[in-house]
Image: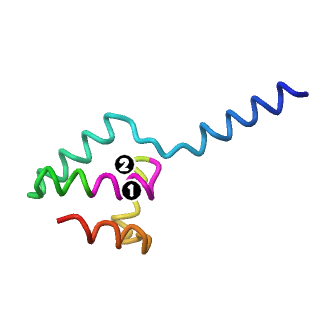
Amino acid sequence: MKYFIIIIFFLFISCNNNQWSDLDQKVFIQDCTDAGETLNKCTCLLSCVMQDFKNYEHASINFIQNQSSEQLSVCTSKCN
């Protein structure tokens, strides 16, 4: 039973991980710079977006649906 609880704990931690893959991060930066933003601004925006979404796909879907949190809006407003 002890090992079962430990396994469930590790699965819970890994499933709640908002760590973006290196590829997602690179694609976000590339798309952002292709849209005309500076690398510094894109890096700032990426750090904000990574806090709210588990990966680039979920971020894209929410942006398309025009849904973002107030925390994200505050964070991105500081990226200049």
Instruction: Give the residue type that dot 1 points to.
Output: Ala
**x%, y% of residue 46?**
30, 52
Confirm whether the magenta stretch covers residue 53. Answer: yes
x then y, percent, for residue 35: 12, 57
Q: Is residue 42 left or right of residue 49?
A: left
Quadrant where the C terminus is found in the figure: bottom left
Q: Residue at 41% x, 41% y: name it.
A: 20
Give amino acid for label 2: Tyr
Q: Which residue is mark 2?
A: 56
Q: Residues within 10 Å of mark 2 (few under 14, many from 20)?
A: some
Mark 1, residue position: 59
Magenta segment: does it hold 27? no
| Residue found 8% across the figure and 58% down from its top | 36
In the figure, 55 relative to 3: above or below? below
Magenta stretch prevailing secondary structure: helix
Quick one: SS at disc 1? helix
Which quarter of the picture shows residue 19? Answer: top left
How many callouts does the rendering have?
2
Determine crowd level at label 1: few under 14, some 14-19, many 20+ residues with C-alpha closer than 10 A.
some
Determine whether label 1 and label 2 are within 8 Å by CB: yes
- Occupied quadrant, residue 42: bottom left
Instruction: State the image coordinates of residue 67 (x, y, percent, origin top left).
Output: 41, 70
How far across and how far down the image is residue 39, in percent?
A: 14, 50
Q: Which residues are magenta?
A: 45-54
Residue placed most toward the observer, 43 or 27:
43
Q: Is residue 39 left or right of residue 18?
A: left
Going by the image, does 20 lie left or right of 26?
A: right
Could you tell me how far apart the alpha carbons at marks 1 and 2 are, in whole angstroms? Answer: 5 Å
Residue 65 location, quadrant = bottom left
Residue 4 image label? none
SS label for mark 2? helix
